Structures are given as structure tokens and as C-alpha cells.
Amino acid sequence: MNRKVSVAPMMDCTDRHERYFLRLISKNVLLYTEMIVSEAISRGDKDKLLSFNLNEKPLALQIGGSSPNLLGEAAKTGEEFGYDEINLNLGCPSKKVEKNKFGACLMKEPNLVADCLSKMQSKCTLPITIKTRIGYNDIEDYENLFKFIEILKNTGVKNFIIHARKAILGKFTPKQNLNIPPLKYDMVYKLKRDFPNEEIIINGGITSTEQIKEHLKKVDGVMIGRSIYHSPYLLADIEREIFNNEDVLSRYEVVESLIPYVKEEIKKGTRLNQIMRHTLGLFHGQTGSSFWKRYLSLNMCVRNADVQKIDHIMDKIKLNNLNAPVGKFA
């Protein structure tokens, strides 16, 4: 599994429509689902929760929970559905998540986490990975982080994604937890030095290919979240500069390639805005990006939008493209 660059699991963002869209831009990055709770997988509609388009692969399933048995069964189900990796969420800081005893609060209970990981590995043959933080509340010393990772490593897990911020539990919102605690990349770098045989992936505040290249000198991989969601065509730069792949669609070609998928999904009952909302940032930084966002807002994000509007927006983009300066919709 190539984890050199991956797109972070993000609630209300990395659903199946977003992943299909991102895969049109990048063939090499590893994509993650939104976090799905193990209990929901056990009791809910598995097809609705876990089905995906094969074009999204390579694809990892992120799950949340603290019951070894439920997590083990969820991992087994994820393998049966065809995912390439199962990831355990140990980093989400929301109050709701903490109340239900999963996410970052589990850093307080490393032995329970170890039991969960052992059960997950016993139930499936896929790589089991974790995504966690460097600490929580007042606990952010390196010694504590080292001991936490060492306990988890002893279960046989070899892949660790580290968000280089601590989590403030019970006080900060998830959004505040993505911005206020300072980034401490050096702690992640030190983990790689101390665990040279494990795969250490860094996450948090990474916004450019230049930063990716610098991090890759010291760790095994880089995970990016919000920067990709707000400016998805950054993936094209990543394809060219990190994976040496020049066979990348232009922004216009991405939209054109998305149309058949959109039409097929609408036939199944998917609302247009459920797909197109993920594309708002496609022309970020380009002349004319405001036209794209405005047109989507007015024509795509309405409940009863129909298939004809897809063709109409393409005609409008073509017209604008023909009348635009070079590079407007490149």
C-alpha cells in the first residue's frame, strides 16, 4: 500500500461522491472514508454505510469505537466489502465522540486500544492502522506519546498516522482543535527516529507540495485534509511533483469526466447538490472561480435540480472558457 500521500478522513466531507471526484484528479493518493462507528456497522444498513465505487480505490475505511468485539466485526465487514485498509480513529476530539468513548479520549486507555487492535487483526487480514494525536489536554510530553505508540506497536500494528497537535477534550470544538493547539512536527519526526521499522505518517497544517517534500525527508508519508477539500486541484500538483505522473486531467476535463457519474447517481435518487457541493473549490485561485461557485450555488444546490442542468452548466463553462483569457479554466 502506497501511503506517501493520503487524503484525511473528514466528517461530512469524504463521502463516496467526494472520493469519486478526487480520484478523477489523482490516481495515486490513498483515500479514506468518513469515520463510521463500529456499532452503526453492526446494527445499521451495511450496504448504505459501506458501499463504494471501485474507481475510488485504493480506499481505507476509518472506524470509531472502543468495543474490541464490535471493532473486530467491523474490520471483518470492511474487508468483505473490499476496502484496502482499516483505520481506527484515536484522534477525533468532539464532545459527542468522547461521550460515546471513542476518538482522542482513548489515548487515556492504551491497554484498551491494544485489545481493540488485537481483536481487529484477528478478524481480518487487511492492514490495521491508527490515526491519533500527539497528546491530549495537559498530556503532550514525548515520553507519554512514545509509550502509547510502543504499546500499540506490540500488538503488531505497524502504521501510525499522527496529527501533530494535541486534542483539547471537553473545551474546544472540533474546529478549534484543528487550529488552536500548536503544531509540533518535531515530535512526529522523533517518533520516526525511535520507531525506524514502523510507518509514521504526519498530518496537520500541510498545504503545499513543497511542505510535503520537506516532511517526506523525515517521515514515511503525509496526510492532508482541509487543504484538499477547499482546493482539490492541489492533487494535480501532488500527482506531478510527488508521484511523477504527468497524465493529469485539466480542471475542465475533471468536470466533463464527472458528468456521467452525476447523471447515473441522479437516476438512483441522489440529489445534485450532494455531489456538486464537493466541487466548489475546483477552480480555487483561478480567474473565474467566482463564476463557478455562483453558478453552482444558484443552479446545483437546489432540491429538485434535474439532469438537464448538468448539460447546461457545461455549456456555460464552455462559453466562458472560449471567451476567457488563457488559463481561466485550465
Image (spheres, rainbow, N blue to C red):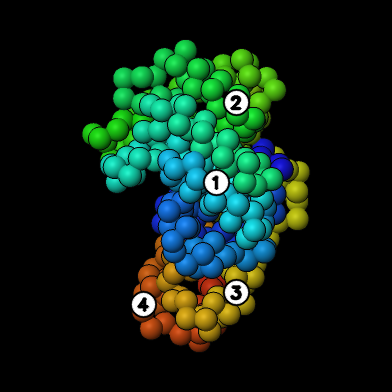
* Alpha carbon separation for disc pair 3 and 4: 18 Å
In the image, taking residue 293 as reference, residue 119 lies left or right, namely right
Question: Where residue 140 sits in the image (x, y, percent)?
Answer: 39, 19
2 over 185 or under it: above or below: below
Amino acid type indicated by mark 4: Val
Specify the farthest residue to the top. 143
Residue 240 visible, this angle = yes
Labels 4 and 2: the sequence-earlier one:
2
Tag 3, which secondary structure? Answer: helix
190 over 223 or under it: above or below: above
Amino acid type indicated by mark 2: Lys
Labels 3 and 1: the sequence-earlier one:
1
Viewer-nearest of labels 2 and 1?
A: 1
Amino acid type indicated by mark 3: Tyr
Point 68% across, 19% down: residue:
196
Nearest to the observer: residue 320 or residue 145: 145
* Alpha carbon separation for disc pair 3 and 2: 41 Å
Question: Where residue 117 sits in the image (x, y, percent)?
Answer: 55, 36
Viewer-nearest of labels 3 and 1?
A: 1
Tag 2, which secondary structure? Answer: helix
Residue 203 visible, this angle = no
Point 51% across, 33% down: residue:
115
Q: Which residue is mark 1?
A: 72
Numbered badge on residue 153: 2
Point 42% across, 71% down: residue:
273
Point 33% across, 44% down: residue:
100
Viewer-nearest of labels 1 and 4?
A: 1
**Circle 2 Cα neighbour tier, 10 Å, few/some/many (<14 / 14–19 / ≥20):** some
Tag 1, which secondary structure? Answer: helix
* Alpha carbon separation for disc pair 3 and 1: 33 Å
Labels 1 and 4: the sequence-earlier one:
1
